[in-house]
Image (spheres, helix red, strand yellow):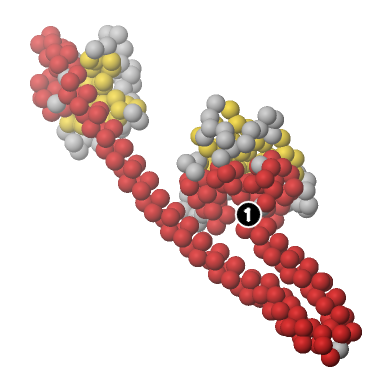
Amino acid sequence: MARLLGEGTGAEWAQVWVMASAGLTLAATWPADTGIPETDPVPGPDGRDATAPGRRALAVSLGGETLGILRLQERPDLPLSGVEERLFNALADRAGLMLRLLGVRADLVGRHDELVERAGELRASRERLIEAQDAERQRLERDLHDGAQQHLVALTVNLRLAQALSKDSPDRAGELLGRQADAAAVAIETLSSLSRGIYPRLLSEEGLVPALRAAVATSATPVTIRADAMTRLPAAVEAALYFCCMEAVQNATKHSGASAVGVDLSSDRGESRLVVTDDGVGFIQSPGAATGAGLVNMRDRLDAVGGTVTVISEAGAGTTVSALVHVQAA
C-alpha cells in the first residue's frame, strides 16, 4: 500500500500508519531505506500534515472509527496534481478494511508477546516459590532439631529418670519432676516462637489490621497504620498483604534511615490496596540492576493471589511500596 501510494503520486516517500491498542504505529514506509524520522502524523482538514512543508496526511476510517493514516512527502517544487490527489483520496477511502485487519493483527501479536512474557514470569515465580518452600522446610527441620527437639528429648529422659527414682528415692524424684515443669514451659515457648515465624496466629483469628498493629508495635522506626473501614479479606489475600507490608516496613527500618513509616490500607469496590511509605534516603535503581530478594518475594506473594506490587523511590525522597489486589471482601 505504501509503495502504491508513493509510485502512484510520484511522492518522495510514503507511509502507512495503523491505530492499534498501543496507539498510532508506523506499519510501513516506502522506500524502506529512506531513514525518515518516525514522528506521528498530524493531519489537517485540508489534507496537509502540520509536521513539515509539502507533507500530506489523510485519515483512514471505517464505520466512523479512525483506523490509521496515510502520509506522503511531495517532491520539492512538485505538488500533487489533480489525478494524484484523487488517487490519494481514493486509496484512503478504500484502505479501511485492510488497516482494521492490520490493527487486529498487531494487537494479537502484542498480546501473544505479552502472554509469552507473562508465562515466563509465572514459571520463574513458581520455581522461586518451590525453592522458598524447600528452604522453609529445611529451616523448620533445623530449628525443630536444634531447638524444640532438644528440650523435648531432655524432658523425656528426665521423666523416665523420675519414674525410675520414684520407688527408691521419692524425694529426688519429686524434685526432678518439679524442674520438668520449667523445662516443659521452655519447650512450649520454643514451639510458639516457631509457629509465630510460620504464620501469625492473630492474622487468622482477628484479621490483617490487628496483626499488623501487633507486629509493628516493637518496630525501631515509628509506624503509623491507617485502615479506615477495612473489612476482612480472604485468608490468602490477607496473608499476602501482611507479609508484603512486613517486608516493606523491615526494609525501611533496616536500610532507609527513615524517621517514620506510614501504612495505608483500603478496600473499595473489589480493590484492596496497601501503600507503605517512608521518608528515608530512597534509592535509584538502574534498568539493568538486579532486583532485590525482598521485592521478588513481595511480587511472588502478590502474583499468587492475582495482585501486583510497584515500588517508587528516588534518592533523598523516600520510597513508596504499593500493592493492589482485585478481590471481594470475605
Rendered residue at 31%/22% (across/down) = 41
Name of the residue lying farthest toward the bottom:
168
Residue 93 visible somewhere in the drawing:
yes
Rendered image quadrant of residue 21 = top left
Rendered residue at 82%/85% (across/down) = 166
Is 18 placed above or below 259 here?
A: above
* Quadrant location of the N terminus in the rendered image: top left
Name of the residue lying farthest toward the right:
171
For this rendering, which residue is in front, 69 or 130? 130
How would you rate the neighbour count of disc 1 (Cα within 10 Å): few for under 14, some for 14-19, many for 20 or more?
few
Is 136 placed above or below 320 here?
A: below
Give the image location of residue 307, x and y in percent: 50, 41
Disc 1 designates what residue?
199
Residue 56 visible somewhere in the drawing:
no
For this rendering, which residue is in front, 93 or 244? 244
Rendered residue at 50%/50% (across/down) = 300
For this rendering, which residue is in front, 26 or 14? 26
Name of the residue lying farthest toward the front:
167
Give the image location of residue 172, x and y in percent: 87, 85
Q: Is residue 254 left or right of residue 141?
A: right
